[in-house]
Amino acid sequence: MNDKLKELADLMFPNVTKTVSDYEKMYPERKLEDGARVTRFAPSPTGFVHMGSLLSALEDYKAARDTNGIFYLRIEDTDQKRSVENGITGILNDLKNFDITPDEGMINETDAIGEYGPYIQSKRQEIYHTFAKDLVLRGLAYPCFCTSVELDEIREIQELNKERIGYYGSFAKCRSLSIDEAINKIKAGCEFTVRLKSPGDFDKKITLHDEARGDIEFPENDLDVVIIKSTDKLPTYHFAHLVDDHLMHTTHVMRGEEWIASFPIHAQLFEVFGFELPKYVHLGVVMKIDEEGVRRKLSKRKDKEASVEFYHKEGIPKDAVKLYLMTIANSNFEEWLNNNPDKDLSEFKFDFKKISTSGSLFDVEKLFNISKNYLSKLSATEIYDNLLIWTKEFDPEFYNILENNKDYAISVFNIERGGEKPRKDYTSYSSIRNFVFYMFDELFENPDYEWNKITDKEEIATILNTYYEKYMVLDNKDEWFPKVKEMCDELGYASNIKEYKKNPDMYKGNVADVSGVIRVALTSKTNTPDLYEIMKLLGKDRIKERFDRVLKK
Ligand code: GLU
């Protein structure tokens, strides 16, 4: 070994006692079945997950689950500016809310499960330093003493001369320092970063493979990128990615497409270590069309629908959110879902080739629609149980009512549920109250009656009184409507709509107008599910009470 390089490396990393191969022994190959994928979700501890990152977590999770692999959570906190207090807890909660459970990784702010940790980068400094020292010892990394002012100057010159921006070739000043010069500067206490001494040639091409996009040709990397930062001695993303994904035996690096440009840097880092390159999947960006009709990236700052919390508050079932996210994840998923409406998500195989690489449009309307379909398939008891959980957090008044009237509430949710064509009005748990409030006396204290065709007070009174006294049937579904028709004949309304359309002038109105009066009197709404079912559940006394209330007005 070159003694001078060793002196330099020891000066740069005085605390390193292990070698790269020591760590490789500590983290041996995983014992998994052939083809099992090891994936990771690697967020900064920013405290919450937004829809874009939830999507990639779901994709990572699916990719691993589909193959009996491992999905782990690694916290990337090397950019300390992005860390927030309890940032890991927030992420864990969001993942848990969607049943995306990592097999390994952080489980709270400080602890982790799994044999390949630490799973938080700030606790891996010694490992990064060992790997960086290895490069220095082999003459493949060097200390750089350039100040930010000097780096700015380099950039200005490059901009002025229209040259490629970056620290490379003759611009890489510290690359050409002699080892002695470097040693002396460190001994003199100069601050330094550690840079890769790139062996690449920008004029040569390399082809890298992306599992979603196929082969991509790049110029070789010749940038002497920073691998260890000066201030906190933490690694850059590039270097941490190399070390972590190598030692944690990640098979598939699935990450945002903003990393494509750095792909040649990463391939080179793996190459200088002689490590096998993992497979890469660069995911598309999630887009939206904003109010001005402009297509742009979904923004966690600007767009409320980008935050996971939004769906929680709205009461969109997490499974519906997941189904929707899968339609973004794989272009063939929607068709699969339509063909297999009753199959579980786990039966769908996530396919890298079906990832939309041009970016997918985030469509809240579609999400609500999926939610609607999803809710329409739940049983009344499931609706009740889930709604109880949601209202407990967001609507305590409704929660109490539901809790005190369990069986009745389930019967209410059961109206037009099940069967071939179940009702599809609920879009979310938060929407349900508006569709059923009239079934609960406590919520029907001051209704806003939507009188429609028949608005005359005398006429309304006549209809309600006649109906209650002579025609109301609550115990026979086949008979109740014929009775309403009978009443129409008595009161001068057409009991047959076709007949009415032919000779509208002969009647005061038709049977729909008459049943509409009954409906509004009982529910205040012009649109409700099956009126007979509603009346049956309200029962005679409450019907009377509601009619009287209208009559008194
Ligand atoms: N912490 C990186 C990010 O949030 C992770 C990228 C990756 O998965 O490699 O962009």
Image: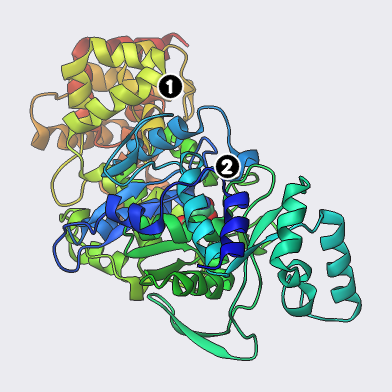
- Find residue 52 and report its horizontal and vertical position in percent: 49, 53
The answer to whether 42 is drawn above or below residue 351 in the figure is above
Where 494 sits versus 260, above or below? above
Mark 1 or mark 2, which has the lower sequence index?
A: 2
Q: Tell me if 536 is positioned left or right of 455 in this view.
A: left
Report whether 478 appears left or right of 519: left
| Residue 123 x, y percent position in the rendering | 47, 39
Q: Which residue is mark 2?
A: 304
Vertical arrangement, residue 137 with respect to residue 18, above or below: below
The residue that appears at 20% across and 63% down in the rendered structure is 36
Q: Position of residue 441 (x, y in %)?
A: 33, 12
- The crowd level at tag 1 (other Cα within 10 Å; few <14, some 14-19, many 20+) is some
Q: Residue 394, which numbered label?
A: 1
Q: Looking at the image, can residue 423 be seen?
A: no
Judged from the image, the secondary structure of the residue bearing numbered disc 2 is: helix
Q: Nearer the viewer, residue 3 or 270?
A: 3
Image spot of residue 496 (x, y percent): 26, 48
Q: Tell me the amino acid under the disc marked 2.
A: Lys
Q: Amino acid at mark 1?
A: Phe
